[in-house]
Image (cartoon, rainbow, N blue to C red):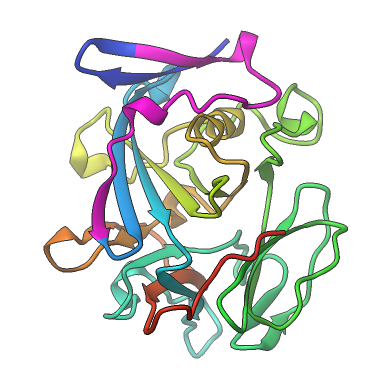
Amino acid sequence: MSELAVRGENGPRTFWRSDSAPAVWSEARLARDVHWRRVATGVDLAELTLAGTGEAWRTRLVVVRLDPSQVSLSLDTALTRKGEPAWKIARAPRAAVFAVNAGQFRSLPWGQVILDGRQILPPEHGPLAMTLAIDSVGGVHWTFDGQPPASHVAWAFQSYPVILREHAVPSALQGTNRGLDVAHRDARLALGRLESGALIVALTRFEGLGAAFGSVPFGLTVPEMAAVMGSLGATDAVLLDGGISAQLVAGDGKNRVTYRGWRDVPLALIARPVRRAGQAGLRNR
């Protein structure tokens, strides 16, 4: 049995237990503990401290909320001459108000990648795969495996596993021996969307040995990360490459916050300020 609690002024408050885990998240149990602060136009940041089981006993949760009507989303990449991953937070464009490693990686990204309208890698298929696509006018599309692809796509990447779909936790996360390792603990990174259409990104950092060891790959299980996203109010969510790959930057000027990874990656999701009103919008699938 495992459980998750949020640490507050009045001590830890449990919001999830594996022996009574909801199959459908109908309540955003962490909402009252999240105190958003605006770090750039269209970008809000919150940080919580979680108390988990085992090595997750002290975990920092970093949450970023993006408003696609106020930021322009795209992808960025960097490879060495030998074709090895070379993107890291330090390479984020100066104008970016948010950046995070995107997708799952072997050496290259897993699944489809479209950069500026050009398909670089073809789609992959799997029951827990999804595609995030940004169309030519900035609309954001979530497409799950088996659904028709979005049209007029400018940027897209795939990732897995889906950990929430229409508030529901996939059956593969609800027990053992269902094709997914539900016991392994690691630093986690997840991308979700809220009812409003805003995107939400959550990153965990281990705090048991102090801030200097925050990027050590200790942390939550996959079901626990599904619980985090569900309790934050996400309707849909998918894991991104966590562990030593997980890294993000959010904000501008004095508000800029950076969490670095140990490993260079091949792909990143970038947000820049919208240049003019109406440039970007929501078009959810």
Quadrant in which the C terminus appears: bottom right
Q: Nearer the viewer, residue 250 or 134?
A: 134
The one nearer the camera, 153 or 103, is 153
Residue 221: percent from left, percent from top = 55, 30
Taking depth in this image into account, of 162 and 221 the one nearest to the observer is 162
Q: Quadrant of residue 17?
A: top right
Residue 266 left/right relative to 62: right
Residue 123 image-quadrant placement: bottom right
Q: Nearer the viewer, residue 245 or 228?
A: 228
- The residue that appears at 38% across and 51% down in the rendered structure is 64
* 70 in relation to 125, above or below: below
Q: Residue at x 31, y 69 (%)?
A: 97
Q: Which residues are magenta?
A: 13-39
Residue 107, x across and y down, in percent: 60, 69
| Residue drawn at (48%, 65%) of the image | 68
Counting from the top left corner in percent of width and height, residue 134 is at 61, 73
Quadrant, the N terminus: top right
Q: Residue lying farthest front? A: 277
